[in-house]
Amino acid sequence: MPSVPHKSPNPATSPLVRGSRYVMLGLGILYGSWQMKRLSKKEVEIQKVEDAIRAKRDARLAKEAEANMKVEMNDLAKEMGVENRM
């Protein structure tokens, strides 16, 4: 199998192309930081709403867990022949 020589890239890149690449890189970085700042502000508001929902849900689940525990303890008391304790 014949070996194909590796051709190096063209070293004579136009200064306009090189400059354009750096300008686009800089613009991309600026756009990304602007988007990050804008979306971070929105996320703070979303997190406040989600925290309130999460707190309500946790309270409801704790209440349900306590009610279930009382029922289970009373069932266990009946099985063991003890009067209801809860």
Image (cartoon, helix red, strand yellow):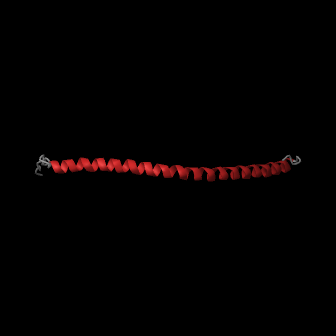
- Observer-nearest residue: 25 or 82? 25
x and y percentages locating residue 73 in the rendered image: 80, 48
Q: Residue at x 75, y 52 (%)?
A: 68
Q: State left or right for residue 20 relative to residue 4.
A: right
Badge count: 0
Q: State left or right for residue 22 relative to residue 47.
A: left
Q: State left or right for residue 67 relative to residue 18.
A: right
- Observer-nearest residue: 60 or 26? 26
Q: Residue at x 49, y 50 (%)?
A: 41
- Observer-nearest residue: 69 or 58? 58
x and y percentages locating residue 67 in the rendered image: 77, 52
x and y percentages locating residue 69 in the rendered image: 76, 49
x and y percentages locating residue 25 in the rendered image: 28, 48
Q: State left or right for residue 67 relative to residue 56.
A: right
